[in-house]
Image (cartoon, rainbow, N blue to C red):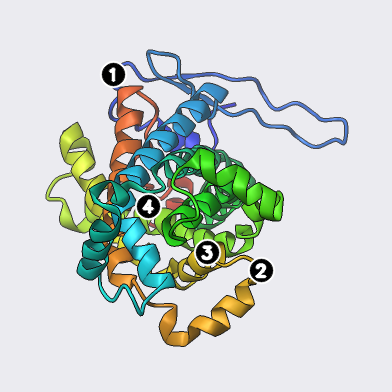
Amino acid sequence: MYPTALTQLARSNLFSSPLFNIQKVEEPKQSLHGQRTRTLAAAATSDDVVFGSSKYYALCGFGGILSCGLTHTAMVPLDLVKCRLQVDPEKFKSIGNGFRLTVKEDGVRGLAKGWAPTFIGYSMQGLCKFGFYEVFKVFYSDLLGEENTYLWRTSLYLAASASAEFFADIALAPMEAVKVRIQTKPGYANTLRECVPKMYAEEGVWAFYKGVVPLWMRQIPYTMMKFSCFERTVELLYKHAVPKPRSECTKSEQLVVTFVAGYIAGVFCAIVSHPADSVVSVLNKESGSTATQVLKKLGPKGVWKGLVARIIMIGTLTALQWFIYDSVKVYFRLPRPAPPEMPESLKKKLGLTE
């Protein structure tokens, strides 16, 4: 049997040509329940990284660690100011004012508060987010079949990214709680080693997971927008904005398209997820509060505080994440499917071919 829907698309990987090859895999066998089982196709490069293999998913997860861990850590100063705008708008009235007050009170080093939990937490989130996204995308594609994968590709991106983010937030929640506590509660703790035992002594394990539901509220819509908007924007850019086919673009040109599509996706991500982000920031600062109480306290206007800072941060962050992730795929010569095209079988059904 030859490759399933996404594996067939992976054969058009530009970066592995002409060393890219397709290997035959076993014919479907009957399961104990009489159902036909399928084996993922082996779309391999010269380094034997097979599309859909454990090694493929592991390297995608590694790309996720780099893309999320490094970018979020680099954005810590802006993230710190954004969090303070959300939890103390009376004192921190704007981005510029937030930076000035932070430097005045804590010095330049104060802008790096929370870098350690940020790096650890978002590295774990990136591992699950990007790694599981690739897993679920193939899994759901196999359930849909080749034609439905094309017709319902946006729904596929949404479902795969939401499934991946569910697990990614469980991995992120403890370090996110520590980060916000360090950044928004002056005098509470200055380092990861100081903050973790203090939080555990006061509230137990719950201190690290009480924000997981608001995280799901923030991150799942954010990630659904991040992946689906990126995938469709790439498709539209190659179709309408790039003056030549993708097959004629250099690696550098393709990575520029990746960056632009990532930034566009990031702007929409920031808007969709900002209200929940405000709730998470306040919730992790105030012990004993619930998400509902915080939402009522902030009100319709309060949940949008710090939006401009978040758009700048998330737009840049998302663009860099996709750029780094795609660069990792290029470096390790992983299969990189081209923008999807209508399968020939569907064209025949719709009468688009002779």
| Location of residue 25 in the rendering, given as x and y in whole percent from the top left corner | 59, 20
Frontmost residue, 95 versus 14: 95
Front tag of 1 and 4 = 4
Whether pointer 1 and pointer 4 mark residues with C-beta atoms closer than 8 Å, the reply is: no
Image-based side of 47 in relation to 158, left or right: left
Q: CA distance from mark 3 to mark 4?
A: 35 Å
Closer to the chain start, of discs 3 and 4, is 4
Closer to the chain start, of discs 4 and 2, is 4
| Location of residue 56 in the rendering, given as x and y in whole percent from the top left corner | 49, 26
The residue at the point 61 percent across, 41 percent down is 139
Name the amino acid, label 4.
Glu
The residue at the point 55 percent across, 54 percent down is 177
Front tag of 4 and 2 = 2
Closer to the chain start, of discs 1 and 4, is 1
Q: Which mark is residue 231?
A: 4
Q: CA distance from mark 1 to mark 4?
A: 25 Å
Q: Which mark is residue 288?
A: 2
The residue carrying mark 3 is 285
